Image: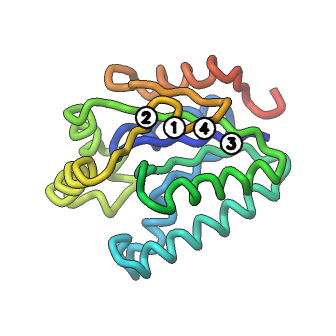
Amino acid sequence: MAVIFLIGPPAVGKMTVGLELERLLGFRLFHNHVAIEMVAPYFSYGTSEGRRLVKNVRAAFFDAFAANPTGAYIFTYVWAFGVPGEREYVDGIAETFAKGGHDLFWVELEARVEERLKRNRTALRLEHKPTKRDLDWSEKNLLETDAKYRLNSEDGEIGQTNYLRIDNTDLSPLETAELICRRFVLVEPGA
């Protein structure tokens, strides 16, 4: 089956677009905060132990998903380009799914920071991501993350065949999801 990787900076709309894709296609969304929120009551993602646990939780889910030959999934991820180990981590996830016989589709979202700051405060985001509910901290973290890391790729850096980059600053989540479906000719499993 198929796996869609939605990548991009914080509050670009990965989860919201993923929810629209889930609704349109019947794929299952596993957004990057599922594991973060699971670990957060015990260890902050800002600690080495928190990051290790999040990585282990994700790996366990990825292995299980990849072993399901009929599964179709959507994953979201904030990829810090140029940071040692990031490329290898993402390539390892992709390899897990490729070995399981899944087709991989890469979608990179980008949006102006002013729009992302607005999206950072949406009810849907705060409902699904409790660690973002301290809005002063969350906004500061978004801006600091932008300043510290390169969160969108350079031309050709992703290097995948099934790749699409979308500036969704002025697009609704549904419009963005529909662009993805049309570009990759994706339909609901079994349809």
| Disc 2 residue type (three-letter) | Glu
| Disc 3 from disc 4: Cα separation | 11 Å
Helix, strand or loop under label 1: loop
45 above or below 11? below
Disc 3 crowd rating (10 Å Cα; few below 14, some 14-19, many 20+) is many
- Earlier-in-chain disc, 3 versus 1: 3
Identify the residue position indicated by label 4 in the image. 22
The N terminus: image quadrant: top right
Cβ–Cβ below 8 Å for labels 2 and 3?
no
What residue is drawn where x is 55% and y is 27%? 164
Q: Residues within 10 Å of mark 2 (few under 14, many from 20)?
A: few
3D distance between C-alphas at marks 4 and 2: 28 Å
Residue 127 is left or right of residue 108, and the answer is left
Residue at (28, 39) in percent of width and height: 119
Q: Position of residue 79 (x, y in %)?
A: 45, 50
Give the mark nearest the N terminus, 3 or 4. Answer: 3
Q: Which is more foreground, mark 3 or mark 4? A: 3
Left or right placement of residue 101 versus residue 185 in this view: right
Q: Disc 4 on helix, strand or loop? A: helix
Using the rendered view, name the quadrant where residue 117 is placed.
top left
Label 3 sits on residue:
3
> Comparing marks 4 and 2, which lies closer to the viewer?
2
Task: Give residue 2's position: percent from left, percent from top.
Answer: 74, 39
Q: Which mark is residue 154?
A: 2
Q: Tally the marks.
A: 4
| Disc 1 + disc 4, Cβ < 8 Å | no
Which amino acid type is marked by label 1?
Glu
Residue 92: mark in rendering: none
Q: Which residue is label 1 attached to?
A: 157
State the image coordinates of residue 33 (x, y, percent, origin top left).
Answer: 45, 58
